[in-house]
Image (cartoon, helix red, strand yellow):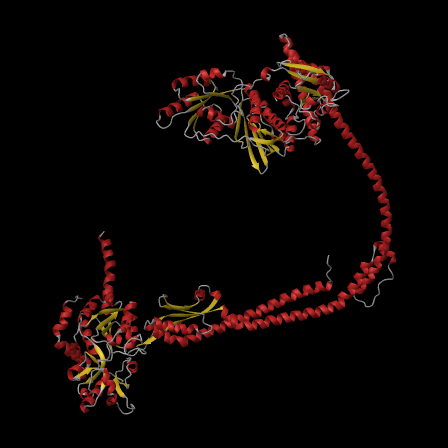
């Protein structure tokens, strides 16, 4: 009789043990994009998960490919999903059930055209977008044929469509890497030259430079689909990007089932605008590597990340 | 018949063969072309993997369904692609486009072509398979591509065929048809009678097969001329012999017809000559029977009467058989009441059966017609014969008669099965059973009597009536005769079916004969009653007591057979009546019982009837007992057998005057003797037609004749002529007041046509001698009542 019970127990326990071991040894693949805050905070998250015994692997991916990676289970975790640039893809993936919304950071985001405050002196009326239209020539550069130049990031944005819809005499100049934006900004500030460029919040820039976002007509979803909507009845995108956008975390659909404890930790993680800006500044201003920046951030914000772990499950 | 030339036939066969060969070759060509095109299309489909694979990979990687659909929209624009289906790695459908039938072609591959390739996306330096795309094409695409080629092939084959036809036709006409037509024209011109008129042999131009044929034909004509001459000579001789034989045959035919006529006349004469003295013998013996004779004389007289009746029966049988064999039997087609018919037939036979302690059980439940049209005399003869035989050859047990009728349009099929528990018939004798003068063996004749003509006559009668008789028998067990004859629907069917409803009635039948009991039970159940059967008083008593003690089921009626083996049904009935006066009792008696209606009524019986009873009469009895007389609608038209007998007296006590016209004094005496029993009648005799007319003329207006009994064959003026004169009012109208007088013909002739001739000259009725006293009395009473 005892032999039978022992035999049965063995049958029940072996799969459970094996399952746990497999899940523990299979790495959680965290996406690293090409902007600083995302990389540093992803490494912070990786450290936290590793401290809980999970194997972690970082995978470089472009934003456009990351969704397929998440959907097909090749990538597992994205720590920064910005509403302004990623909401369409994110919502689509969540609706298909292949990607799961792992919670929202407390930070509010905005991605928009931005200028340093000194530009207001030469272009009165700013931050209203109409003022931008009036003094487009101030932003012209060599080769722009008198048109104002908007310095865009390496990410695909509908800026050209916005310029056409709002009838701005501007053209766009896209930098190859995100860091190049700050090179352009530093040079302009040093020479007090008018500049308008792509910026976002939370970002380290706001802690080091004084400036404002251009106030385009208020965003509405119809603006992107219905030409009749807005100030120009012929074209879409006659509006700005959403203000106070959300910043979410996204995981693979099977993440929670496979690593329930890790999912709880990820869900708990919530960062404010300052905390994100701080992480970016360690790299972009202080010149630390991403790994060093992550370690410093963890050192300076121990109480915060400990609270995330405290409520989490144990191994 | 239209002639077909050899050339045409040859051409037709060659051309058909050519067509078959051309069809096969063209088909192979088309098949190969199709296969080649199919392979080409398959290769083309493969090439689209390179074009669309990458973009599909990216779309599937991003799960962009709209983008996937856009790509599929683009793919379907490719002419050879009829459909595209995209599935994930697990085979789950992602998207599809195109004709659904085409998409299902993979399952039925014979209908189409398809190509499947993997969809992959390269990510992080690794190729990752995401699903499979299948491109479908179908045979329509292939056909479209090759249709012009096919058309060319077919036109090519048709043109070749037509050209071959024309060339062959031209040469075959020139070489074959034309010379042959010349030959056939020559043959057509030949007439057998003018063979010598043919000129010189046909000209021979070339030396081919046709020329040889022409030469042979000329030679054949010469031989034909010789043969014709011989044939003509032979024909003349043959014609002479045929004439000679024809004369001889005509002579033989005339002789035979004369002999046949002599035979018919002889039979008529014999019939008349034998029946006249027989009439006298039987009549006189009948009169003698009524006179005062001592016991010895009575016995001698009864033996003599029995012998005379047997002799008459034999004569009648021989006459019937003679008529049937010569095909001169004529059948009547008159409406008659089937129920009355059955009552009469079965009552008479039941008496014979009862005398032998047998029970005649009758089942008429399936008789669906009250009236039919046919010859009831002959049907009676058939039934009498078969049932009489059954009774005769059964010593113990029962004779069960089952009758049914069924309509087939205007025709009614009358079927009757007679089953007995008699001695049975040996197998080897069954085949000879219906032959004339045949009985099972000599001992049968000795033991049971009979001429052996009965079954032969019956069988032939059934055949005459459009039917048949078959028999099944087992020696020592019994026999079963199945009779079926054809009747017709009556011209008028006034007897409506009488509907009896015995719903919720509980009836007990006490009968020791199982067949009789179960037939009655079946019939009564069909009327809605709940029936309990008992074979003895003890069983019945138990059933009735049980029923009476139940709350819901009470016995309403008991049918008791009087003789139940050792038990007496009558006594039990009386006892039952005392115990339960509310139960209605019906006593079933046999033909030999002699109790009076009053006695039975006093004993507590609501009704009695004599077995066997036909189903329709049983219904009426049950209804009468259940509901009383007022409920019966047709009772007056069909008085049941247990009602009081008919009044045999002359109606209204008037005095009636009858004129008997008979030349034979013996017969006069016989008829006078028979009429003695009729009250209030005066009979005047006349010896021939002339005297009869005188009597009528001299009769006083206040003392007229009411009826004439007219012999047919008489000297001076026969009955036919006298009747015609009476119907015409006499020679000069002196008998105008007798033109409608009832005239009954009395004739010794019983051959075909006698009856018709009597009715034709105006006689009202017909009787064949020797006269039957009862029938004569009945006919006279019926006539006087009118």
Does residue A270 sit above or below A36 in this rendering?
A: above
For the residue pair B638 and B22, the one nearer the viewer reads as: B638
- Horizontal side, residue B700 vs residue B358: left or right: right
Across the whole image, how many numbered discs are drawn on residues? 0
Nearer-the-camera pick, B555 or A128:
A128
- Residue displayed at 86% across by 50% down: B230
Residue A234 pos. (x, y %):
32, 78
Relative to residue B594, is residue B185 depicted above or below?
Answer: below
Q: Residue B245, percent across and down?
A: 83, 39
Q: Quadrant of residue B650?
A: top right
Residue B613's x, y, as percent? 52, 25
Report which quarter residue B465 is drawn in.
Answer: top right
Whether residue B657 sits left or right of residue B541 in the image: it is right
The residue shown at (24%, 70%) is: A251
Q: Is residue B207 left or right of residue B105?
A: right
Q: Position of residue A275 (x, y in %)?
A: 15, 77
Q: Which corner quadrant of the image does residue B709 belong to?
A: top right
Using residue B689 as the reference point, say whether residue B786 is left or right of it.
left
- Which image quarter holds the N terminus of chain B? bottom right
For the question of whether residue B770 can be seen, the reply is: no
- For the C terminus of chain B, the quadrant is top right
Residue at 79% x, 61% y: name it: B184
Q: Is residue A90 visible?
A: yes
């Amino acid at each position: 009789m005892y032999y039978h019970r022992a035999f049965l127990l063995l049958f029940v326990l072996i799969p459970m043990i094996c399952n746990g071991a497999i899940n523990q040894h299979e790495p959680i693949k965290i996406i690293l994009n090409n902007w600083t805050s995302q990389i540093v905070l992803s490494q912070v998250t990786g450290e936290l998960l590793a401290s809980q015994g999970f194997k972690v692997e970082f995978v470089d991916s472009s934003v456009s490919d990351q969704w397929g990676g998440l959907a097909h289970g090749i990538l597992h975790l994205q720590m920064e999903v910005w509403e302004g640039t990623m909401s369409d893809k994110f919502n689509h993936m969540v609706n298909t059930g292949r990607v799961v919304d792992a919670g929202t950071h407390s930070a509010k985001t905005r991605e928009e055209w931005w200028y340093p405050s000194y530009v207001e002196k030469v272009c009165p009326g700013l931050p209203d977008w109409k003022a931008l239209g009036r003094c487009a020539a101030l932003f012209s550069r060599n080769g722009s044929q008198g048109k104002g130049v908007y310095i865009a990031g390496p990410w695909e944005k509908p800026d050209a469509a916005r310029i056409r819809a709002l009838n701005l005499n501007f053209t766009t100049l896209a930098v190859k890497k995100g860091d190049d934006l700050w090179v352009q900004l530093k040079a302009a500030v040093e020479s007090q030259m008018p500049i308008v460029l792509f910026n976002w919040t939370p970002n380290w820039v706001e802690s080091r430079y004084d400036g404002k976002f251009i106030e385009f007509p208020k965003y509405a979803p119809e603006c992107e689909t219905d030409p009749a909507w807005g100030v120009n009845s012929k074209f879409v995108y006659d509006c700005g990007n959403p203000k106070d956008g959300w910043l979410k975390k996204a995981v693979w659909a099977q993440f929670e089932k496979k690593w329930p404890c890790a999912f709880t930790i990820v869900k708990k993680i919530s960062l404010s605008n300052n905390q994100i800006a701080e992480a970016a500044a360690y790299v972009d201003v202080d010149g630390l590597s991403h790994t060093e920046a992550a370690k410093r951030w963890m050192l300076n914000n121990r109480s915060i990340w400990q609270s995330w772990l405290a409520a989490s499950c144990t191994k | 018949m239209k002639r077909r030339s050899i050339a045409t036939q040859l051409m037709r066969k060659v051309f058909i063969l050519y067509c078959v060969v051309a069809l096969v070759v063209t088909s192979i060509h088309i098949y190969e072309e199709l296969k080649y095109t199919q392979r080409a299309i398959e290769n083309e489909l493969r090439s689209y993997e390179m074009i669309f694979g990458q973009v599909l990979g990216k779309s599937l990687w991003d799960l962009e369904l709209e983008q996937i659909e856009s790509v599929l929209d683009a793919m379907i624009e490719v002419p050879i692609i009829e459909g595209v289906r995209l599935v994930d790695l697990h085979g789950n459908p992602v998207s599809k486009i195109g004709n659904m039938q085409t998409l299902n072609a993979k399952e039925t591959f014979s209908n189409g072509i398809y190509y499947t390739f993997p969809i992959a996306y390269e990510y992080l330096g690794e190729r990752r398979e995401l699903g499979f795309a299948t491109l479908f094409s179908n045979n329509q695409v292939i056909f479209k591509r090759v249709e012009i080629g096919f058309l060319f092939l077919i036109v090519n084959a048709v043109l070749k065929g037509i050209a071959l036809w024309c060339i062959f036709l031209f040469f075959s006409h020139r070489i074959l048809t034309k010379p042959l037509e010349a030959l056939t024209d020559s043959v057509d011109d030949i007439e057998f009678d003018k063979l010598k008129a043919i000129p010189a042999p046909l000209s021979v131009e070339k030396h081919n097969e046709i020329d040889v044929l022409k030469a042979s034909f000329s030679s054949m004509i010469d031989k034909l001329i010789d043969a014709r001459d011989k044939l003509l000579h032979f024909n003349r001789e043959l014609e002479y012999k045929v004439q000679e034989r024809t004369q001889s045959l005509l002579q033989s035919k005339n002789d035979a017809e004369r002999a046949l006529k002599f035979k018919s006349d002889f039979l008529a004469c014999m019939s008349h000559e034998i029946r006249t003295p027989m009439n006298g013998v039987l009549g006189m013996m009948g009169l003698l029977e009524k006179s005062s004779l001592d016991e010895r004389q009575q016995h001698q007289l009864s033996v003599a009467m029995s012998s005379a009746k047997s002799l008459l029966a034999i004569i009648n049988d021989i006459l019937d058989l003679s008529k049937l064999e010569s095909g001169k039997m004529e059948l009547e087609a008159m409406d008659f009441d089937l129920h009355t018919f059955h009552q009469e037939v079965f009552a008479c036979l039941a008496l014979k059966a009862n005398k032998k302690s047998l029970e005649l059980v009758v089942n008429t439940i399936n008789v669906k017609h009250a009236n039919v049209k046919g010859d009831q005399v002959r049907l009676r003869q058939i039934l009498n014969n078969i049932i009489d035989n059954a009774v005769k050859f059964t010593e113990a047990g029962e004779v069960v008669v089952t009758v049914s009728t069924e309509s087939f349009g205007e025709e009614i099929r009358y079927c009757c099965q007679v089953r007995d528990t008699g001695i049975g018939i040996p197998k080897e004798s069954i085949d000879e059973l219906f032959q004339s003068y045949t009985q099972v063996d000599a001992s049968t004749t000795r033991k049971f009597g009979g001429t052996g003509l009965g079954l032969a006559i019956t069988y032939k009668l059934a055949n005459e009536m459009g039917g048949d008789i078959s028999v099944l028998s087992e020696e020592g067990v019994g026999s079963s005769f199945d009779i079926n004859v054809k009747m017709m629907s009556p011209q008028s069917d006034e007897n409506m079916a009488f509907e009896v409803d015995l719903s919720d009635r509980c009836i007990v039948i006490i009968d020791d004969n199982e067949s009789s009991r179960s037939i009655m039970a079946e019939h009564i159940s069909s009327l809605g009653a709940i029936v309990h059967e008992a074979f003895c008083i003890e069983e019945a008593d138990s059933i009735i007591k049980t029923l009476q003690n139940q709350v819901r089921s009470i016995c309403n009626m008991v049918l008791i057979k009087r003789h139940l083996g050792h038990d007496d049904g009558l006594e039990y009935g009386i006892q039952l009546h005392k115990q339960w006066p509310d139960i209605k009792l019906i006593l079933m008696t046999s033909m030999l019982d002699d109790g009076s209606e009053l006695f039975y009524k006093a004993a507590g019986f609501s009704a009695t009837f004599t077995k066997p009873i036909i189903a329709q009469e049983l219904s009426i009895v049950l209804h009468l007992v259940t509901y009383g007389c007022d409920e019966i609608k047709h009772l007056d038209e069909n008085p049941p057998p247990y009602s009081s007998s008919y009044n045999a007296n002359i109606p209204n006590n008037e005095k009636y005057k009858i004129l008997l016209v008979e030349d034979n004094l013996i017969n006069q005496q016989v008829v006078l003797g028979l009429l003695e029993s009729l009250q209030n009648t005066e009979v005047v005799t006349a010896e021939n037609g002339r005297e009869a007319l005188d009597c009528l003329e001299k009769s006083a207006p206040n003392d007229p004749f009411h009826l004439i009994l007219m012999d047919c064959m008489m000297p001076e003026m026969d009955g036919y002529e006298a009747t015609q004169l009476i119907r015409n009012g006499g020679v000069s109208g002196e008998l105008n007041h007798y033109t409608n007088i009832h005239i009954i013909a009395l004739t010794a002739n019983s051959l075909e046509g006698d009856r018709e001739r009597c009715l034709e000259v105006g006689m009202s009725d017909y009787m064949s001698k020797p006269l039957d006293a009862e029938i004569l009395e009945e006919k006279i009473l019926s006539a006087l009542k009118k």
